[in-house]
Amino acid sequence: MKTSDFYYDLPERLIAQTPAQPRDAARMMVIHRDTGLHEDKIFRDLPDYLRPGDVMVINHTKVLPARLLGVKEDTGVPVEVLLLQRVDKDSWETLVRPGRRLKKGVTVSFGDGLLRAEIGETTAAGGRVVKFLYEGVFEELLDRLGEMPLPPYIHEKLSDPTQYQTIYAKEEGSAAAPTAGLHFTEEVMQRIRDMGVEIVPVLLHVGLGTFRPVKVDDVSQHVMHSEYWQVTEEAAEKINTARNNGGRIVCIGTTSVRTLETAADDNGIVHPGMGMTNIFITPGVKLKATDVLMTNFHLPESTLLMLVSALMGQEEALAAYREAVEKEYRFFSFGDCMLIL
């Protein structure tokens, strides 16, 4: 299987730069896998496609203000540090710019010295381990000095940082938002609860590897980034009970899929647990714990498009994407979405 097998032509004008207003006004392509029918709907129509007894699985990770802008202390050269993953209390795996000038031992200052960082070892993935030096509470300083780490294809600055958080974001630790969840409003969530659908949170802290392109020609040679996941005993019990009672497992976003597929055994039973996952879902991989997926439209040749193709078929997925381009759906993080039934 080649990476180029997942290419589609996307005009740049269809890459959404701002979210829909209101959130639930985004368009939604509904894919009926059993009949091949495609419908053009609005996200707030989602409850019409759910059933009492279903479980809707959401990722309640919260995006860190993980982009820090500072200066190299000895020269004043501007420096950008992007937090990826915590190593210990004060050390983080990061991406730094300009990487070549920031050798081991160099110190960087943020906020006129309120927060300082010492550049450490290079990681296997090409990032850097950074140790932060500060007084007080790190999270409070990060809230004060950090910015939201928007994807590289979004060029407009957000007027309101909460636009890049889901309304149910709770557990801080992501370097990027689980963007399918950005469409939800409190009204839509309440309609779903009222119809007898259980909403179950799981956790996967999204890393920036989500946006890294697949650089190998042979898909099987690609190594996925690792991300922290957690499924509680309560979440696993609710998911398994719904499945046993004939309900469907409706995943909101690819991060929810990756979490459940990591936690599930070969029989589709989801087990509680936590740890790091680098699960790579491509066509030919059978999804064990996912029945329905609501997700945004993903980058060409991306691991996320490969995951969608595993669920609905490669040719069918690419045909749906070409249709979305023709109908001028909005793409990527702030774009429209598709519901795969």
Image (spheres, rainbow, N blue to C red):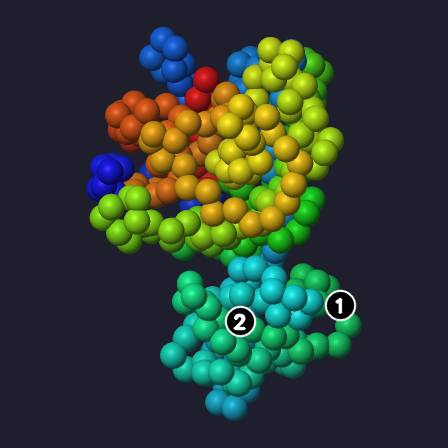
- Tally of marks: 2
Q: Quadrant of the N terminus?
A: top left
Q: Quadrant of residue 109?
A: bottom right
Residue toward you, 116 or 269: 269
- Residue 192 is marked as none
- Residue 137 is marked as 1
For image coordinates 59% across by 26% down, the residue present is: 269
The residue that mark 2 highlights is 129
Residue toward you, 291 or 36: 291
Q: Position of residue 208 (x, y in %)?
A: 47, 54
The amino acid at mark 2 is Val
Is 137 placed above or below 275 here? below
Q: Position of residue 84 (x, y in %)?
A: 53, 60
Closer to the eye: label 1 or 2:
2
Whether pointer 1 and pointer 2 mark residues with C-beta atoms closer than 8 Å, the reply is: no
Residue reaching furthest top? 35
Count residues near mark 2 (Cα–Cα under 10 Å), then give few for <14, some for 14-19, many for 20+.
many
Count residues near mark 1 (Cα–Cα under 10 Å), then give few for <14, some for 14-19, many for 20+.
few
In the displayed structure, does residue 245 sit left or right of residue 297? Answer: right
Residue reaching furthest front? 266
